Image (spheres, grey):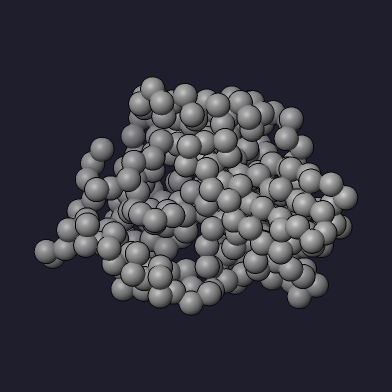
Amino acid sequence: MKPIIITGNRTSEDIIREYFEIQENKKPGETGSGNLTVDFSLEDLTDSYRITGIQYRNGIYTVNLFKELLTYQTQDQHAEHRKQVIADNTNEPYSLDYPLFNSTATSLFQNKDNSQYKDKIEEVRQFLKQQMLDKWLMTLTRIQYNPENQKDKVIHNYNQQDSYKIELDSFMGPDGYITNSDTTNVIEPLQALLNTKQSLQEINSIYKWLTDVNAYIWRLNSEASRTTETVVGINTDSDRAWFNCDRHIDNPNASLGVSVARLK
C-alpha cells in the first residue's frame, strides 16, 4: 500500500488524533473536516482504483475500489465471503457497508476540483454511476424495522466481527426525494444509514454530483407489526439516486468490490 503523504511535520498519528477531536466537537449537520487536512490521492491500477485519504468511522483509510463487480449473491453470502477474505488475509475484494460507500463518494466529491486528480475522479464517478444504473448493488447494511415502542436498528457490516448498530426511534416514513418538505422523518434515518452528520442538502449534493439526479429514499411506510429486516442497496435511474432500504434479504445481487486498509 502506498502510504499517505503528510504535509509539514504532522504524522499520520497527529492527523488521526485531530480527526477524533473534530468528531467529538462536531455539531449535527456538519460533514466534518474542520481543521483536519488529509492528503487525497487516486491511482488507476490494473484492476482497481486506489483512493487514499478517506475518512471512515474512526480513522483514515485507503480504499481499493475494484473495476469488476462481485458476483450475484444474497447478503448473507456476501457477508460470509467478506468474513472469509479477512480471515485468510488475502487481497481479494469483498462487499462494503453503506457508510464506506458514502465516505468514498464524499471524498471524491470534496476533491472533484483538484487539478491533479480531476480527470481521474471524473472517470471513477462515471464508473460508479454506470454500475448504479446497470445494477441494484448489494451492501452489507440492513435495516431492522421493529414494532411500535421498540427502536429500529441500522446494522452495518452485517454478520462481521466489526459489525455495529445504530438505533433510532423510527426508520419508517414516506418515500420521497430527501430534500422535499413532504418527505418527513428523513434526516435521522439517513444519518444513521450513512453513519454521518451531513445535512440533507450536503447528502443530496454529493449524490446529485455522483449520479446527475436528486437523492430519493425508499423504505417501509408504516409501522411493522413484527420485526422485519431488509437489505439496503445502491442504485440509480434517470430520475433519482435511490437510498433503497426495502429489499428482501433472500434476493441475490451483485456488489461493488473493495479492499480497505487503515493508515497507521
Where's residue 2, x and y in %?
23, 41
Please report the residue visible at 62 percent of the width from the left and 37 percent of the height from the top: 138
Q: Is residue 117 visible?
A: no
Query: Is the residue 165 above or below the residue 256 in the image?
Result: below
- Drawn side of residue 150 relative to residue 110, left or right: right
Where's residue 221, x and y in %?
84, 57
Q: Quadrant of residue 25?
A: bottom left
Q: Quadrant of residue 232?
A: top right
Q: How many marks?
A: 0
- Drawn side of residue 193 relative to residue 175, left or right: left
Query: Is the residue 153 above or below the residue 127 in the image?
Result: below
Please report the residue visible at 88 percent of the width from the left and 50 percent of the height from the top: 225
Where's residue 179, x and y in %?
69, 70
Q: Residue furthest front?
A: 149
Nearest to the observer: residue 186 or residue 43 = 186
- Drawn side of residue 72 relative to residue 64, left or right: right
Query: Is the residue 249 above or below the residue 226 in the image?
Result: above
| Image quadrant where one finds the N terminus | top left
Q: Residue furthest left?
A: 9
Please report the residue visible at 21 percent of the width from the left and 62 percent of the height from the top: 14
Nearest to the observer: residue 210 or residue 254 = 254
Nearest to the observer: residue 130 or residue 166 = 166
Nearest to the observer: residue 254 or residue 227 = 227
Q: Quadrant of residue 35?
A: bottom left
Q: Is residue 200 visible?
A: yes
Query: Is the residue 18 above or below the residue 70 in the image?
Result: below
